[in-house]
Image (tube, rainbow, N blue to C red):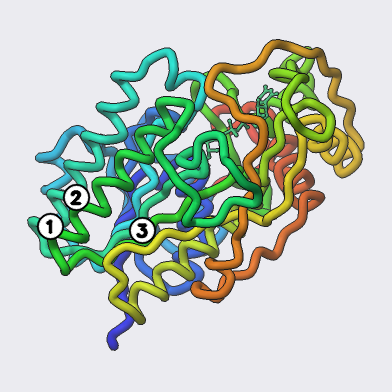
Amino acid sequence: MAKWKTVFVTGGAGYIGSHCIVELLDAGYDVIAIDNFANCVNDPKGEAPSLKRVEQITGKKVTFYPCDLLDKARLAKIFSEHEIDCVIHFAAMKAVGESMQVPLLYYKNNIVGTINLLEVMKDHNCYQLVFSSSCTVYGNPDTLPITEDHPTGTVTNVYGRTKYFIEEMLKDISAAEKNWNIVSLRYFNPVGAHSSGLIGEDPTKAFTNLMPYMAQVAIGNKANLTIYGGDYDTVDGTGVRDYIHVMDLASGHVAALSKLQKEHLRLKVYNLGLGTGLSVKQLVHEFEHATGTSIPICMGGRRIGDVDSLICDGTLAMHELEWKPQYDVKAMCQDFWRWQTMNPDGYRGNSTTKVNGS
Ligand code: WQD
């Protein structure tokens, strides 16, 4: 069967999208990427600094278009100008806390945007999709570690509900139309950065995720880390998560593409995580130890939408996608720290790295 050549990546300029595109290019795919820069930096020419760095890392070109999934006409025009074999759909607003404050924005952006994408795919006879889902669809899990057949839907935050509703949509369309061939990847907590230090997580909004915030404290941009809640039912009262290196997450997407080319799946769901849980305090300690930094902390109240523990059973993906995570928590911390120290102000600052044409 002819190997697919061209992959269309939504949200390609973002943290996970840009790391995934490195792996896609290294695997020999051509990449068409779009992004609306809702949560990543764009340069004055409307280009994506993160993707310029991806080109530097791989020595390959990325075809990029600024595009919002809510602009269906522009999306359809871009789609019609390329022979697209498969779509990887990252584009979404993804901050658990923020989603509780602006629910309508999250529902419109994440769900209407996905409906537009699915309709444009269908109009262009493209039914191959890898969807970026999330462990938040499991809500506050009844059992740990969490397998893919754990019930979803009892989600505690709007962000997770958008991912749950989209997965339900994917179930319905793949039941109604046999052409659909979909893998939904439920990420646990992506952290770390490419080993070059050239790309990383650089939110344009408030730093909400734990590792980027810790790194900001470590380089002195923030005074201290507030730990949201010390009374959870966990080893030390702080929230437990299953952290996975973003490059392992990226290789999981390439493995999913291979699976879709070998088998017509209709819809298959896989967890992507390591199967180990770390509390906030444990991750702070790991980060300090791995990077030789110090993170002053203070205890705060629980953050709305958070749950006690999320730990993955990732064996299904490891077996069926022949995917094996390569990086441990020390690498996650050291790789993120290299990105942060080389780029104290992310893609906006005068980084210590020279980028092609800069
Ligand atoms: C982790 C832990 C916080 C910040 C993320 C993504 C989401 C999804 C799942 C992919 C929690 C605590 C955090 C801080 C803290 N990923 N924390 N102080 O909420 O698990 O969700 O992974 O789909 O998109 O956002 O990640 O890093 O925000 O929080 O104490 O300043 O760290 O309470 O226990 P979360 P997070």
Q: Residue 168: where, in percent of width, then height?
A: 29, 46
Identified at 28% across, 85% down, the residue is: 2
Query: What is the crowding at mark 2: few (fewer than 14 residues within 10 Å), some, or many (at least 20)?
Result: some
Q: Are marks 1 and 3 in contact (CB under 8 Å)?
A: no
Q: Are marks 1 and 2 in contact (CB under 8 Å)?
A: yes
Compared to residue 303, the image places residue 160 above or below, namely: below
- C-alpha distance separating marks 1 and 2: 6 Å
Identified at 40% across, 38% down, the residue is: 153
Amino acid type at image mark 1: Lys
**Would residue 20 be found to the left or right of residue 228 on screen?**
left
Q: Secondary structure at mark 1?
A: helix
Q: Is residue 192 visible?
A: no
The residue labelled by disc 2 is 118
Q: Residue 125: where, in percent of width, then height?
A: 12, 64
**Would residue 108 be found to the left or right of residue 131 on screen?**
left
Which of these two is toward me, 94 or 33?
94
Mark identifier at residue 59? none
Farthest residue toward the front? 142
Mark 1 C-beta closer than 8 Å to ligand 1: no
The residue labelled by disc 3 is 130
Amino acid type at image mark 2: Leu
Query: What is the crowding at mark 3: few (fewer than 14 residues within 10 Å), some, or many (at least 20)?
Result: many
Which of these two is toward me, 197 or 253?
253
Q: Are marks 2 and 3 in contact (CB under 8 Å)?
A: no
Compared to residue 84, the image places residue 69 above or below, namely: above
